[in-house]
Amino acid sequence: MTEQKTETALSSDPTEVRRQKLDQLRKTVGDVYPAHFHRTLTNAEFAEKYAGLEPDQESDDIVTVAGRVYSSRNSGMFMDIHDASGKIQIFSHKDTTPEEARALLPMIDLGDIIGVKGQVRRTKRGELTINAHEITMLTKTLLPMPEKYHGLADIELRYRKRHLDILTNEESKLRFQQRSKIVSGIRRFMEGEGFLEVETPMLQTVYGGATAEPFKTHHNTLKMDMYLRIAPELFLKRTLVSGLSDKVFEVNRNFRNEGVSTRHNPEFTMMECYWAYADYEDIMGLVERMFETLAVAIHGSSDVTYGDKTLSFKGPFKRVPMPDAVKEATGIDFLAIKTDEEARAAAKAAGFEVEKDWTWGECLAFIFEEKVEGTLIQPSHVTHFPKDISPFAKEVPGEPRLVERFETYCNAWEVGNAFSELNDPEEQRKRMVEQLEQAHSRGEKDKQLDDEFLDAIDQGMPPAGGLGIGVDRLIMLLTNAPSIRDVILFPARRNKAD
């Protein structure tokens, strides 16, 4: 786009030119930012209503529309205005448009928001058009628009000035519209499965439910430190204890004071749910149904293109126990290894660098991440995780070192994590105390035991399956986004001065 030249443009500075036009408009028009303007149709509704109008045919209808000026030709005789739903061509000519309205044209710049009232027609070339009878300035913009057809070339500027990115990039606009559809689709799916949506605290006095560094704040009135939640798990389980519903879920914002990458943002969205009288295999089926439902809703098919890959979200997904996957990839049979020392020795013999205090399960999980995770392109459930990295899951019958836990992988990313939830209060306390001692040994001095949660579990929690879905990563997969910052409207970033 280029700024159109007018006789009123006395300065070479585009912003100053606009301010000069604003001053003139205030003198000639009055209110340049009116509070009241009512359109009769959105641009999409306009296109649908008059789709049957033939080329070079007029309608007797008079309509009122509004939108931002994206292009201007022949000194404003032809303009395209866009609202969130699409564009309309506006035609202003002395034969159809009063002089009062045409006098406004030199004052209109690209990016201005205008209202138009006029008669509907389709041009000889087939373009739906409004012959302007009245033009109203609704918002005079003071900054030039970026070039429409190339948008913002600086990727960091796209994230910092998301409003401009969406204004000039149809792909970004569509992606965030799809994000909204996916999040609402998750809610509709869960409600259709009989789950009750609840809300749990984002400010917590004791953080827990996951292993992560929290954001810390302070409540002045209560004179106490608090934390932004890293997970809603412990509150949702307390809800399950209450008997409010046998199926509860929450679409929530979590906060983790850790690294930033193409798949990690300090603030992110999860869907977490708990299902009484179900186990992790029931949850696998729930995940498969959800993912397929969302893929079809967005793409009309369970097959989704991501980069150069075609991902099939048609269930059932591949299911593989973690020890089996590691054995197939490396030849190391962890189930035949009895001690932590033997596990570390086997890992070192295979060329892996492990810490001197790592347990059997930590060695198994590390080698899985190194050798297997990157191969899981199609949606897959990895089951039977080590117990010593899964403090809230039930043991696998006959193999006490493993638990009934799975993670769902796609495109080599973890997008879901689920357990057959531990509900033995004594075992739960034992594992949480062990986890707390490990955290303190690593220097996490703020970590505390959640006694209120343990008190609730003492009251009795039914057997249940639990699930957490990384909504942002799932949206990345469903919208072909290369970075998590492409699916978060306003992602975390450094200060501009940095």
Image: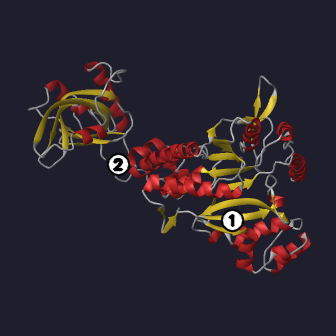
> Most extreme residue toward the left, as rendered?
95
Residue 211 image point, x, y percent: 77, 51
Is the residue 295 above or below the residue 243 in the image?
Answer: below
Residue 237 image point, x, y percent: 75, 42
Image-quadrant location for residue 407: bottom right
Q: Nearer the viewer, residue 470 or 286?
A: 286
The colour scheme is secondary structure
Q: Name the residue located 69 percent from the left edge and 46 percent from the top edge.
A: 274
Amino acid of disc 1: Val
| Observer able to see residue 470 | yes
Task: Name the residue tied to disc 2.
Answer: 148
Image-quadrant location for residue 113: top left
Circle 1 SS class: strand
Is the residue 95 above or below the residue 302 in the image?
Answer: above
| Observer able to see residue 262 | no
Q: Please rate how many residues cluster around mark 1, counting C-alpha atoms within 10 Å: few if below 14, some from 14 to 19, many from 20.
A: many
Side (left or right) of 316 relative to 304? right
Distance between mark 1 and mark 2 Cα atoms: 45 Å
Q: Nearer the viewer, residue 100 or 353?
A: 353
Of marks 1 and 2, the one in the foreground: 1
Q: Nearer the viewer, residue 203 or 162?
A: 203
Side (left or right) of 251 relative to 305? right
Residue 48 image point, x, y percent: 26, 42
Q: Name the residue located 89 percent from the left edge and 75 percent from the top edge.
A: 342
**Of marks 1 and 2, which one's residue comes earlier in the chain?**
2
Circle 2 SS class: loop
Rendered image: mark on residue 382: 1
Amino acid of disc 2: Lys
Q: Please rate how many residues cluster around mark 2, counting C-alpha atoms within 10 Å: few if below 14, some from 14 to 19, many from 20.
A: some
Residue 470 image point, x, y percent: 62, 52
Side (left or right) of 260 relative to 108? right
